[in-house]
Amino acid sequence: MTDAGGPGSYTCRYCRMSSGGTDLSCPFCGAPVDVTERVTASGWEELPAIADLARIQFGRSDCQVSGLYVPVCDMNLAGDDWVFFSHNVLLWCDTQVELDALSLDGAWNRTLAGMPLVMMYAKGPGHVALSHNVPGETVAIPLHHGQIVDVLEHRFLAATGNVSYTWASSGVWFWTASGGEREQHLPIGRFIDRFTSEGNGLLLLHAPGNVFIRDLAPGQTILIQPSALLYKDASVGLQLHFEYPAGATQAPGSFGLGYRGFQTFLRLSGPGRVAVQSVWDNHSFHYARITSSSPSTQWAWG
């Protein structure tokens, strides 16, 4: 936490929200208030894991994050407060909590082991507990009114009722083929999840590994492994970037010829905040089977 200019007033370095600084953790994102600032030589800030049993406030409700290996988010919902989430992360709930499927204007189409995932909501009063069921960190992102955050697919855990969901085209993808059926869209999928706050909302994500955040200045660019992306501000630009050996003769878009010499990155351009996770998937073994791509990838070949 850093001094915000007033007695007893602090601004969290990780969520940028101000509080009294009297608690052991930030009441908006759960980051410890006494954590030593840790910044790499390249400018990335390590996001500290939410402390065990830390409480995060949203409206008249709160969320207690329990555990460090596979965190559980225990939501204490007051009155008519509600949150939404995918049904597979529901761990337990009080019997008086109202649970039902949620219809979203932005659509929701996810599968797990071939079975559809259903978006649900939980409405108070009462407790409901959520867990992503795999090791990693819970990341809490408090949102101001009108703030927009883009999130990699399958990282969403939960959001408060005043946060709206839709999807946006990633603009960067390949199709891979197997047995005559197109099965994957690499490197991050055709779509990304987009969340917009219609008040002071809270977005919870799950990230495997450690999480690092960075503020990009206007025009500043970085390259990251595609699946390492956790979230970004909507103002951050997203493009594909290829690195391949000098003298390669592979024609743009001719992925089906089996050329394997290129390395794919995401090029992110500021201004805005970006977060990455240290655990990522290596899809390079799929590239020999790529048959086509989105139009926005073609120009990147030189």
Image: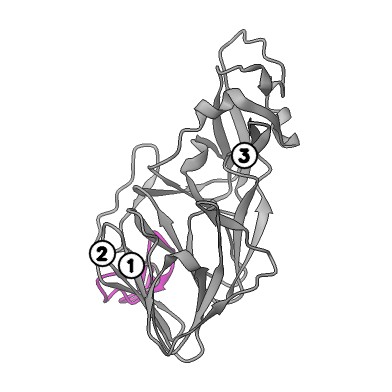
Q: Which residue is mark 3?
A: 183
* Magenta span: chief secondary structure: loop
**Which residue is depicted at the point 54% across and 73% down?**
120
Q: Which residue is mark 1?
A: 72
Of mark 2 and mark 3, the one earlier in the sequence is 2
**Is the Cβ of the residue at disc 1 closer than 8 Å to that at disc 2?**
yes
111 vs 277, left or right, is right
Q: Is residue 142 visible?
A: no
**Which residue is depicted at the point 56% across and 21% down?**
262
Q: Tell me which amino acid carries mark 2.
A: Gly
In this rendered view, identify the residue nearer to me: 16 or 247: 247
Q: Secondary structure at mark 3?
A: strand
**Is the Cβ of the residue at disc 2 closer than 8 Å to that at disc 3?**
no
Q: Tell me which amino acid carries mark 3.
A: Glu
In x, y percent, where is residue 83? Answer: 50, 76
Q: Secondary structure at mark 1?
A: strand
In x, y percent, where is residue 290? Answer: 64, 28
In x, y percent, where is residue 92? Answer: 37, 75
173 falls in the magenta region: no
Of mark 1 and mark 2, the one earlier in the sequence is 2
14 falls in the magenta region: yes
Q: Secondary structure at mark 2?
A: loop
Q: How many marks?
A: 3
Q: Quadrant of residue 75?
A: bottom left
Numbered label attached to residue 67: 2
**Is the Cβ of the residue at disc 1 closer than 8 Å to that at disc 3?**
no
- Look at the image and give the residue range highlighted in magenta: 1-26
Q: Tell me which amino acid carries mark 1.
A: Val
Of mark 1 and mark 3, the one earlier in the sequence is 1
Cα separation, mark 1 vs mark 2, equals 6 Å
